[in-house]
Structure formats: C-alpha cells, structure tokens
C-alpha cells in the first residue's frame, strides 16, 4: 500500500512538556485511520503537526514522500491535506450552496485561474451540488449557513473540505457537541465518503462504536506517545491498550 502520510520520530514540546513524543506513524492511501486516546493524549497536537499549524520540536512530517515539516498549512492544503477547522470561509449570510460553490471556485482558481467560460460555470455549480449531496445536505442547499443546526454546520464544514478536493481529510471530533440524533447522520456522511471517494481520512473521535464501525486501522496515543497501531480487532485485543485506555470505556459484552 502507498504511504500518503508519514511522521518520523515527531516530537512537540510546550515549555518542556512533550505533548507529542517521538511518534512514528504511517498512513496508507485511502485508509481510514482513527486516532484515539484519553484527553490530553496529544491527538489534536499531532493533527496540528500534520496540517502545519505547528512545527515539531524534532522529527519529520512527509506527505506523499515529500518532506513538508517546515511548510505552511496553505502549502500543505495545496499538496492535498485538508483540515476542517482551517475552513474559516463559511459565510453565515450565504446559503450552503453559495458557500460550497465558493470553495469549489477557490480550488479551481488555484489550479486553473481562468474560469469565465460558461461551461466552467456550469461545472462549478454541478460540483457544488454533488458535494452537498455527498454530505447529505442537498435539501438544505438554499438554507443560509447561519440557520443550520449544529450537526448540519459540521456537515457543511466537511463539504467545504471536499470542495477543496484535498486527498487527505483530517476530521477532529466531527460529532463533538452534536445531539444523539445528529451523530448517525455524520457517521453516514463519513461512510459515504469512504465508500465512494478516493480519500484518506484521519479521524479523532471519542465514540468507540463509531471508531470501530468506520476504521481500517486505529492508532492509540497515551501521554503523547504512540501506544499501539493496528487493525481494530488487534487494538481491541491489545492488553496494554485495555489497561491504559479502553478498559474503562469499552466492554466487549456491551
Ligand atoms: N498550545 C499549547 N500550549 C501548551 N500546551 C499545550 C498546547 N496545546 C496542547 N497542549 C498540551 O499538550 C497536551 C496534549 O494536548 P492535545 O490537545 O493534543 O490532546 P488531545 O489528545 O487532543 O486531548 P482532547 O481529547 O482533550 O482533545 C495537553 O497536556 C495539553 O495541555
């Protein structure tokens, strides 16, 4: 399997405290890998190191074999790694469709520049509708972004990521703050992306049933370090993981 993301002995210290400690990790193309671990384990910091929001204290980050450790988040987005909170251009007073169309346009603008042609205009509209349909927001196309429910806003954020056409999606707790009714909808969206598109997805998520349902592989972090990495069944059977983390959260009989 082709490796799309790799970290080599990556460490990030804050005032001497290692939030991420000597983590070496490989993510294959089209894999869905979940990063789990208790609060403060270093998951979000690892995401920040991958997206370029933070530079490591030591170690290297590679994207498709290219060293990107010192490169900016913008450059990394162009290289194909997208993170939901990077999408700050959700305009509350525009509709979902208008927001997604702007994201499609900005992506197309980066690569093609000239878009005055009618067919390009139609192509952009079609793409925007396709993306909204993928995230199950087509019925809300004409709704103003500010009027969306919380779960729908998270779906719009994912739509913006898809519209930017990044090959890697970093999803940091996409269900955070959602109501119980909204969670299955976002789960369905991620499943649909996984099944229908060539994307690599890294998912930080505390909901273990969702992690087990979606993941090809799971990385467990504990105190900044990588505790285990493997297929879901290997992780569930791993005694160290059970002791350190899962024991209190996951019960096989449940
Ligand atoms: N900018 C920062 N400055 C100082 N310490 C930080 C900073 N960001 C994170 N930390 C610390 O690094 C450690 C790891 O934090 P991080 O947010 O990466 O954990 P996490 O696994 O994502 O936790 P959670 O599940 O609660 O989101 C924590 O001890 C946190 O307090």
Image (cartoon, grey):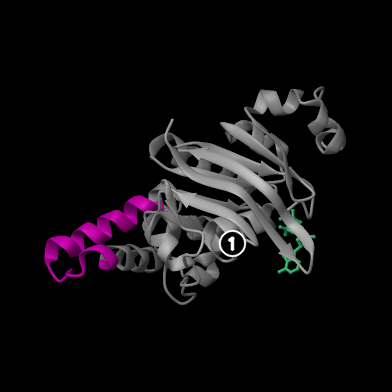
The stretch drawn in magenta includes residue 129: yes
Q: Which residue is denoted by mark 1 in the rendering?
A: 149
Q: Nearer the viewer, residue 169 or 64?
A: 64
Where does the image place residue 53, in percent across and percent down from the top left?
57, 66
Q: Is residue 187 left or right of residue 103?
A: right
Q: Secondary structure at mark 1?
A: loop
Q: Is residue 232 left or right of residue 121?
A: right
Task: Classify 47 as above or below 26.
Answer: below
Q: Label 1: few (<14), some or many (≥20) within 10 Å?
A: few
**Can you say which quadrant of the picture contains the C terminus?**
top right
Q: Would you identify the image quadrant in which residue 249 lies?
A: top right
Q: Which residue is at 52% across, 40% downward?
A: 27
**Can you say which quadrant of the picture contains the N terminus?**
top left
Q: Nearer the viewer, residue 52 or 92?
A: 52
Where does the image place residue 11, in percent across and percent down from the top left?
67, 55
> Which secondary structure class fits the magenta region best?
helix
Where does the image place residue 103, in percent across and percent down from the top left?
37, 65
Q: Is residue 102 left or right of residue 115?
A: right
The stretch drawn in magenta includes residue 181: no
Q: Which residue is at 56% across, 47% downward?
A: 7
Where does the image place residue 230, in percent across and percent down from the top left?
64, 30
Task: Classify 141 as above or below 15.
Answer: above
The magenta stretch is: 109-132
């Amino acid at each position: 399997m082709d490796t799309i993301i790799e970290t080599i002995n990556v460490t990030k210290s804050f005032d001497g405290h290692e939030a991420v400690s000597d983590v070496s990790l490989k993510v294959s193309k089209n894999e869905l890998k979940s990063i789990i671990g208790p609060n403060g384990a270093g998951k979000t910091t690892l995401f920040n190191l991958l997206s370029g929001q933070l530079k490591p204290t030591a170690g290297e980050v590679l994207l498709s074999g290219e060293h990107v450790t010192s490169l900016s988040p913008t450059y990394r987005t162009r290289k194909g790694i997208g993170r939901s909170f990077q999408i700050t251009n959700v305009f509350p007073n525009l509709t979902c469709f208008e927001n997604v169309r702007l994201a499609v346009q900005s992506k197309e603008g980066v690569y093609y520049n000239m878009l005055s042609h009618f067919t390009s205009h139609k192509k952009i509209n079609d793409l925007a509708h396709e993306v909204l349909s993928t995230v199950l927001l087509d019925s809300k196309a004409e709704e103003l972004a500010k009027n969306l429910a919380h779960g729908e806003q998270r779906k719009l954020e994912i739509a913006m990521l898809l519209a930017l056409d990044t090959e890697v999606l970093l999803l940091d707790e996409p269900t955070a703050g959602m109501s119980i009714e909204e969670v299955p909808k976002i789960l369905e969206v991620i499943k649909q992306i996984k099944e229908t598109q060539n994307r690599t997805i890294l998912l930080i998520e505390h909901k273990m049933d969702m992690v087990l349902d979606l993941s090809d592989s799971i990385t467990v972090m504990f105190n900044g370090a990588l505790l285990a990495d493997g297929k879901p069944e290997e992780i569930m059977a791993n005694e160290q993981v059970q002791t350190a983390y899962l024991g209190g959260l996951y019960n096989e009989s449940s």
